[in-house]
């Protein structure tokens, strides 16, 4: 980590190697190893065992926590925060359908660089959905296009698309939902939206960009992502 004179710290995420800056004052010593993760789009941490208390913070889907014990409907973190048990799962428990994970974000606002239900971008949606299913993913779409799955034939045959395939354009990615539709976070709708595949391709072509590739996850991952 490198700290600037202005108080910014430059660091790298262990999960995907992504680098960036954040206030150095927001950093602290590592705590206990995580045992659970948040499975709700967003959950609240309370200072005690009551949902009527003012929450301490909100945590997005995928947040990793060290849970010390449970009391009734609450899980208690090693730091003393109280969360709903129903919003958590064991750290090694994985989702089985990446498309279903992405669909939970329908209507969430588009935010360049975002990765939570408060706002997210196209590659953020893909990374969140894949990570929830235990599939490592780079952060940005051009990295994902190089790293994820295998490329299908250059000529796009819409009839061969499968649930969970990834469609890439220059600096954009979408997830195939079924034979006729896809889901993506995009600046046209300014939200995570469902869109007919043919209509999306035509609309983006009219804006000056063609599909650059279709990527398909390996059989084990594809099976896990099917409904």
Image (tube, rainbow, N blue to C red):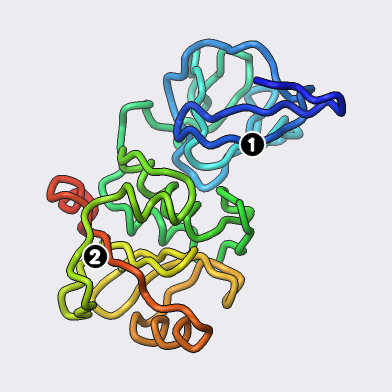
Report which residue position mark 2 lands on. 163
Q: Residue at x 76, y 34 (%)?
A: 54
Q: Residue at x 17, y 80 (%)?
A: 159
Q: Residues within 10 Å of mark 1 (few under 14, many from 20)?
A: few
Judged by depth in the image, the label closer to the viewer, 2 or 1, is 1
Q: Decide which of 76, 146 is in the foreground and name it.
A: 146
Q: Residue at x 56, y 41 (%)?
A: 60
Up the image or down, 120 lies above or below 45; here it is: below
Q: Decide which of 125, 146 is in the foreground and name it.
A: 146
* Residue 47 x/y as whole percent: 70, 23
Please identify the quarter of the rendering in which residue 20 is found.
top right
Q: Which secondary structure, mark 2? A: loop
* Residue 6 x/y as whole percent: 87, 28
Please identify the quarter of the rendering in which residue 31 is found.
top right
Spatial CA span between label 2 and label 1? 33 Å
Q: Residues within 10 Å of mark 2 (few under 14, many from 20)?
A: many
Up the image or down, 29 lies above or below 111; here it is: above
Q: Which secondary structure, mark 1? A: strand
* Residue 84 x/y as whole percent: 53, 33
Report which residue position mark 1 lands on. 20
């Amino acid at each position: 980590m490198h700290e600037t004179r202005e108080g910014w710290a430059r660091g790298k995420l262990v999960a995907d190697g992504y680098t960036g800056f954040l206030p150095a004052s927001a950093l602290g010593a590592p705590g206990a190893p995580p045992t659970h993760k948040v499975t709700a789009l967003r959950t609240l941490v309370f200072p005690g065992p009551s949902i009527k208390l003012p929450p301490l913070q909100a945590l997005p889907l995928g947040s990793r926590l060290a849970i010390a014990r449970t009391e009734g409907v609450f899980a208690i973190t090693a730091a003393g925060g109280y969360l709903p048990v129903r919003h958590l799962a064991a750290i090694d428990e994985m989702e089985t359908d990446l498309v279903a994970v992405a669909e939970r974000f329908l209507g969430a606002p588009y935010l360049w660089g975002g990765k939570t239900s408060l706002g997210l971008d196209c590659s953020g949606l893909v990374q969140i959905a894949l990570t929830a299913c235990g599939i490592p993913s780079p952060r940005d779409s051009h990295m994902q296009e190089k790293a994820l799955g295998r490329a299908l034939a250059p000529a796009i045959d819409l009839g061969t698309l499968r649930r969970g395939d990834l469609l890439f354009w220059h600096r954009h990615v979408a997830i195939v939902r079924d034979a006729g539709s896809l889901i993506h976070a995009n600046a046209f709708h300014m939200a995570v939206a469902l869109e007919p595949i043919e209509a999306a391709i035509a609309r983006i072509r009219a804006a000056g960009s063609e599909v650059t590739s279709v990527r398909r996850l390996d059989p084990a991952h594809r099976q896990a992502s099917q409904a």
